[in-house]
Image (cartoon, helix red, strand yellow):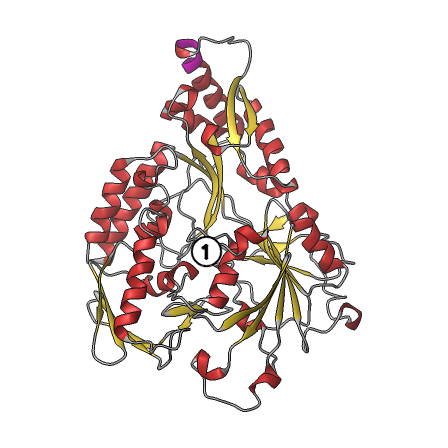
Amino acid sequence: MKLSILPLCLALLAGLTACGSSDEGELDIALIGDEDAVLTSGLRLSGPAQHVRGATQTGLVTLNAQGEVVPAIAETWLPTDDGLSYIFRLRETTWPDGEPMTAASVREALEDALEGLEGTSLGHDLALVEDVRAMAGRVIEIRLSTPEPYLLQLLAQPELALRQPGGETGPMSLVRREEGDITLELKPPLARGLPDREDWQDDVRLLRLHLRTAADAIAMFDDGDVQLVLGGTLGDLPLVETGPLSSGTLQIDTTFGLFGLQVRSEEGLLSNDGVREGLAMAIDRQALLERYNIGGWVPTTRPVSPGLPGEPGLVRERWVDEPIADLRAEATARIAAWREQFDEGDLSQPAVVTIALESGPGWSRFYEDLAQQLASVGIRLQRVADAREADLVLVDRVARYPAPRWFLNQFNCSLEQGLCDEGVDAEVELAMAERDPALRARRLAQAEADLTLANVYIPIGSPLRWSLVRGGVNGFEANVYGFHPLPEMAEIPR
């Protein structure tokens, strides 16, 4: 699928020199987020935090501007024929403290990163890593319990950076930190695994990152104070000027991932799976998404994004061609029947369902539209600030790799994030034990079908990610992960 903003954002003014050139000197970038969130040392990273971590710290491999896996600490890699082992040859370099980067020290750093992710959804994705071994010279081996075609994409995540005391392991250093701003610079070529050059500094520039709210970031872009804004979500989109006189270009990332409602309540109205299915029936997804005027943003009733690479087509959308009026009539009947039997409140008033979602004009618009739709089936949607007190939580999360297992792992019962289905978790484990790709695909499709019928998650579409990009900025490309590596933007093309 291909997303485009409607009406089309004309980039007529994108290259005006009055807005400043991005080819020389510093490149000013606004990241949407505050300093505590973006510069966190933890392993739960927002999109903007991933950009900074990916620039200053790195793992065996990383992602380029197109979202492809490229070398980082490992200069080459080779999977075995059975897919159960990956051999990585490390580049010859040192840790930030000057100690040699050996296979043994890299193994230890990788094991620390893996251990730190235990108990997270990314940790579940990496549970197939059975052993990490240091071999002769600068070679390590990662052994898997079963083949994982997307192991490299997982290892490229910023959370898998190999960190050591004494400085950054990534291609960039944080050289200056001021209130609300940080400055990054590329390291010398040898430190980045490249051939040395005397004049290398002629082809690089500093990156000055401004950590701002969405409104302030957009205002800086409109005023020509920054050439790039990163980290936009649906919550901020209404703030963006999308008309033909816009001072820049709005770029939409075509992502896979989760955008929908996760059920948290184990009591009351939503404890009944038939009622939960009724809520899923009542939502007119097309109408919700059309409000934002994004061409190609496809609604879905599936917990796994449709159109994944190599999808066998074993799972279909729900309620295809069924009129929304008929679906809402069924939802109304189910809700009324449950209330008549179990609700001790005033049945003349709508049932109250609470929802937690972040602040922002886009989220407020989404809430208002969703509340209006659910009112048609006897539900009064009420917004709350604390997700722990909510019946529903809005999930807006980009997939780390485009495969069904990522989606299914987001609802693993061990994460304790809401209602779940232990049978789905067991089906996923059985699927990953299958060596035959066709049998694995069938089991994962069954797990998706079971998760769908459990109605613990109500899908709506895919996550929306946007950036504002001045015409003179190089090194930026929209991609499926919504991740835009900063080091490539620090290189001046000649």
Q: What is the x, y in percent for residue 419?
A: 36, 32
Residue where numbered disc 1 is placed = 41
Left or right: 105, with 130 as reference point = right
> Which residues fall within the magenta stretch?
337-341
The reply to whether residue 306 is visible in this rendering is yes
Q: Is residue 258 above or below residue 400?
A: above
Where residue 40 appears, as percent x and y from the top left, is 49, 54
- For image coordinates 26% across by 53% down, the residue present is 127
Residue drawn at point x = 24 percent, y = 43 percent: 427
Determine which quarter of the picture holds residue 244: bottom right
Residue found at x 69% / y 69%: 471
Q: Which quadrant of the figure contains the C terminus? A: bottom right
Q: Give the answer, above or below, for where 380 lies relative to 147.
A: above
Q: Residue at x 59, y 46 (%)?
A: 234
Is 249 left, or right, of 422 in this rendering?
Answer: right
Q: Secondary structure at mark 1?
A: loop
Q: Nearer the viewer, residue 448 or 118?
A: 118
Asked whether, in this view, residue 66 is left or right of residue 227, the answer is left
Is residue 466 in the magenta section?
Answer: no
Please say if 399 is above or below 136: above
Q: Main secondary structure of the magenta part?
A: helix
Q: Position of residue 318 (x, y in %)?
A: 42, 37
Q: Position of residue 355 (x, y in %)?
A: 52, 30
Q: So how many labels did they put on this image?
A: 1
Nearest the viewer among 10 and 65 is 65
Q: Left of 390 or right of it: where is 210?
A: right
Q: Eyeballing the image, is 109 above or below 118?
A: below
